[in-house]
Image: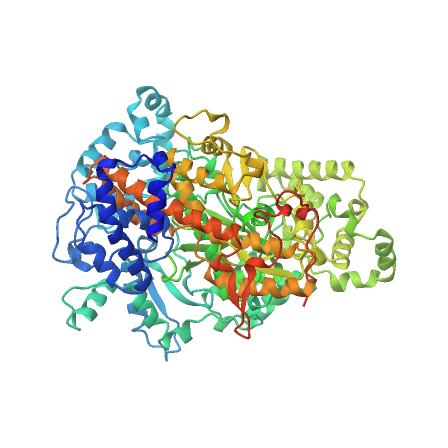
Amino acid sequence: MYRYLVRSLKSPYHEILNLRTKNLKHILLSFLTIQIFLGLIIFYRNDNTLKSIVQVLTVDDFQDGTILYQKLRYNTSSIWIDDYELNKDILTIKFGPQKGKKIGSINELSFYDSDPRLIWSVYLNHLMTMDETSNDPITIPFSWYDWADFHMFNKLMSVTASQKINISCNFLMEAAFNKTVLESIENQLNEPLFSYERKKYSDPFWYKNTRKLDHSLIGIQIPNHCVPNPNGNERFNLPYIITGLYDKLRPEVYELHARNHMLNSLRHPLSLTIMNKDKTSYRVDLDRDRKANIIQSNLLSEFIESKQTLGNKQLFFDHTFIFEDFISKPIVKKLEVKIEGIDKDIYDNDFIHLKQTDFEFDPFDKIKKLETNIENLNSHEKNYLESLKYSINTNPALSPKHFDEAKNVQQVNGMGFHRDKRFYNGALIDHEQEYMQRLNSLIRNFQKFIKANGLISWLSHGTLFGYLYNGQAFPWDNDFDLQMPIRHLHYLSEHFNQSLILEDPREGNGKFLLDVGSSLTIRTKGNGENNIDARFIDVDSGIYIDITGLSVSSEKVQDNMAPYIDIEKFNEVVLQNKTKFDSTFLEEEGEGLASLSITELQSYINEHEDEFDGTIKYKIGELIKGETERKTNSKFFVNNLSRKERYFLNRQFQLYNCKNRHFSTLEMLSPLITTSFHGVDALIPHKFITSLRTEYKLPEKFGFTTFQGNVYLPELRYWFKFPILKKAANINKIFDSLNSLTSSLNDIKLSDILIVYHNLLRIGSRDLFANLYTSFDVTTYRMKEIEIQYDDSLDAIEKLKYLSLLRKQVAPNLESPNKDPVIYDYEKRLWEEYGRHVSTSKITNVCDYVDVRYANMLWEKVESLQERRLDLFKVKDNRDDTIDLNNIGLNLFTGSDKMKNTFFKEDPSLHIV
């Protein structure tokens, strides 16, 4: 390992990082300490010894900074850097006018941050005291305060709790904060209340224009959205309550506004779903009628008392140890989710075969079955039944929008459109790293969640497109798109709608609300307000996954699906099967307005004008106008078919659609291919290239690619923003302080990759470089997958053998390509605190030292990949024989196929089992 430092010091690229020679001796003396630490972090991976090492280091210490920085920047494991203790953490006030004060009891607390180690320990301890033999359902207390990030809210609360400043509703109802009030708050905090564009408040011109408000309008809005807290200045709350969301605000204002609403006015989930990795899940019902955090519910007192009786002088909250204990207890058998008709081991297969019945669902039959057992339904089943009954009685053209985005948040470049309005928690625009971390956590947890419960879902649209290149989403995507067969969408709704899904605490700290829409039985576009069937929402940011169900329906097939329909065969089948229409037509008419066609609905509205406002009348007219234009512009014969005939055609040719009129065929989808996405198991359509070509202009070549200011470098398996890449490559040799490449970007030499790495660090793109390091294995995995899939020297059976080995032996060892966002935020605060106690030069030296070391470590990986000796791909088969996958498949890194290929012209030929 010493050669990394030697190489970095002797290399000409050392000058790029400009390490200060006066600290060189310090760096060398520190090196042995770091090596010992890095060895210990592996040896004591699941032990508290590492944490104790961190605790004995002083703040003003080079080694301490080096350990913290490398953990922050390059370690994506879910290990916390320190312990959570009663006295050190919860009984020591962390911010506000009383920062640093130690209190004697939890009863003196007015606020606390919901550290996962604290919350998990307390709740798991409580669950293990429950009687697993009782027939009564287990219900536990709940408050959003314990299960979401309220850090900024708490900072404000620390000021109001001390009664230093009196804040009114106006503070959270104006477009930007009142500067005078804001400065008073920050004087009490002795730190900024928020960071995003905080400096703009010092710009008089910006402040004046942003604060230009119709105060009479605000006066009208406040009573509709904000009221005084009836309990006054109570603990764990502000003296006013947001009763309805109003998002025409700056992001920092709306963050506090939305968190207040979440705490006080947002309905509790039906349950908590606790993940046990991707193996199984446990569900426990929540008390929806009373808001009670761990102090108000006495759960924390219960925990402290149970531990103190054991004679513990220093009380630690070791949540992962407690979790291991929890999953070994009999109580989990009672809590485990079991879905009838589901194969939970289905992801063990290389291919998953879909059936036509997966895309058909009879809601009327389901309602009958549920109602015959009404007395024994659990809370989720009751909720599901009510949803079905509502949906079948709602006309598609009148279905109200279920999901609401924070689209009116001001000065965020429209980014609010990609965030759930209820869970918005800051702009994240200037925190690209955290945005990527939250997206990564989001998709990894959804994939683990559906696998644990045997549910089927596959990557689609832009998410599938991103996977194609490097096994990750496009870095410019703001959400994910996944599809499910309608039958599995109903499983999802029946068992998990309105459940808060919790990541296994041994793997991370994600918390996600599963929210299924109220128009599940409507399978046509209707008014277009509910194209999305469900969302998996990160409650600490509002970022989400769009989930759409595919089913057979009476929707008009799009013109691009014409090649999949044999018109002559259809006409022949129609003549022979007219009598079968009624028996196969599952889109039965509902009652009342739900039974009316769009033209019949328009007639009804015209006859009952007093029952509908002008907006509805206008929208119905526009829908009819749009359908008429669509029929006129398309010569496709399906436009002349009746509703039942369209349903029969779609069913006959196995054409399945989502509510946004995206169609797929069963042949295109099935059998689904099991692969890896963001380092976890995922499914993709069998004909994934064909599927993408129905939507996008897909390049035929896998290689150097440009798209809207972004550049894909296959050698680095990463998408770069062109301005950054241009600077890192020092194109045209503009920057004297940077080395220039000796080759072109579209055919970069191996030696030039190291120059790109060092230049990225030199120009300050440390986050980007860290991403290249932490995602190396995930992106290399995808490249190896392509090399095997498109190697014509391998027959289909050989491809299957090696792809199966890759998935079963290599994929489980893939680390997350990004850090857990909660741990990142925690470590970032520690790093900022460290920075306040040491000199700028020491900070620079710490960063330079660690970055140089990891640049050389990454370079070593690149060399191993180029020489086809990467340890990642050395695996064992079922006879325990070693197989080196390095030498299997094409060589896309340095071989001739790197530049000359048309891989994405068609789907790879794979053996089906």
Question: In which image quadrant can residue 490 be found?
Answer: bottom right
Instruction: Kindly tell me whether residue 582 is visible in this rendering.
Output: yes
Q: In this view, does 590 lie above or below 127?
A: above
Between 912 and 195, the residue placed more toward the observer is 912
* Residue 231 place in picture, x, y as percent: 23, 49
Residue at 77 percent across and 59 percent down: it is 652
* Residue 54 place in picture, x, y as percent: 22, 55
Q: Which residue lies furthest to the bottom in this view?
A: 133
Relative to 337, 912 lies left or right: right
Relative to 226, 473 lies left or right: right
Q: Is residue 571 above or below residue 913?
A: above
Q: Quadrant of the N terminus?
A: bottom left
Q: Quadrant of the C terminus?
A: bottom right
* Residue 795 place in picture, x, y as percent: 70, 62
Residue at 37 percent across and 70 percent down: it is 138
* Residue 292 place in picture, x, y as percent: 29, 58
Instruction: Kindly tell me whether residue 429 is visible in this rendering.
Output: no
Residue at 31 percent across and 22 percent down: it is 203
